Image: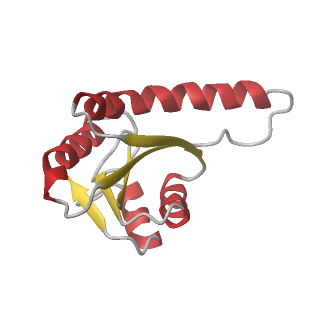
Amino acid sequence: MFRILVPVDGSENSSQAVRFLIKKAALYAQPLEIQLLNVQRPFPGTVRGVHEQAQQFHHDEGMQALAPARALLDEAALAYGYHIGLGEVGETIAEYAKEKQIDQIVMATHGRGAIIGLLMGSVTRSVLHLTTVPVLLVR
């Protein structure tokens, strides 16, 4: 099984990365285990008494961001798992890849929250810096 992680944020760019993976899935020598990951940024500071509401908010936002990618994979009849993480986006992607022993990360060069740099967004740069897993960038 070849494990692929696709970080998604609900943007058209992240959907493009999923479409690319769907087109190229047959080229992989091994069966694919596709994992979708949406990372929610935590609220700044400590707000007492709203922990459950914050968890529900992050879950709802994460499910909304995962919906386009899930629909594409469902339509292509490709099996996948999904997860909603909480933390700094690049760090969380790198940690998840390590924890799940991911073989490759397929991601868009820019997403919804990325600060546009010369060639790629800040999340992409962070992932490239923090992970030892091969990263396939889709524009």
The image shows residue 1, relative to residue 19, as above or below, that is below
Residue 40 visible (yes or no): no
Relative to the observer, which residue lies in front, 136 or 113? 136
Residue 107 visible (yes or no): yes
Total marks in image: 0
Query: Which residue shows up at 51% across the image and 32% down it?
Result: 62
Residue 60 picture quarter: top right
For this view, does 18 lie left or right of residue 97?
Answer: left
Residue 110 lies, in percent from the top left, at: 30, 48
Task: Point out the image quarter for the N terminus.
Answer: bottom left
Residue occupying the far right of the picture: 49
Residue 59 picture quarter: top right
Residue 90 lies, in percent from the top left, at: 48, 58
Query: Which residue shows up at 31% across the image and 27% down it?
Result: 71
Residue 2 lies, in percent from the top left, at: 33, 62
The image shows residue 48, relative to residue 102, as above or below, that is above
For this view, does 20 lie left or right of residue 122?
Answer: left
Query: Which residue shows up at 50% across the image and 52% down it?
Result: 89
The image shows residue 7, relative to residue 70, as above or below, that is below
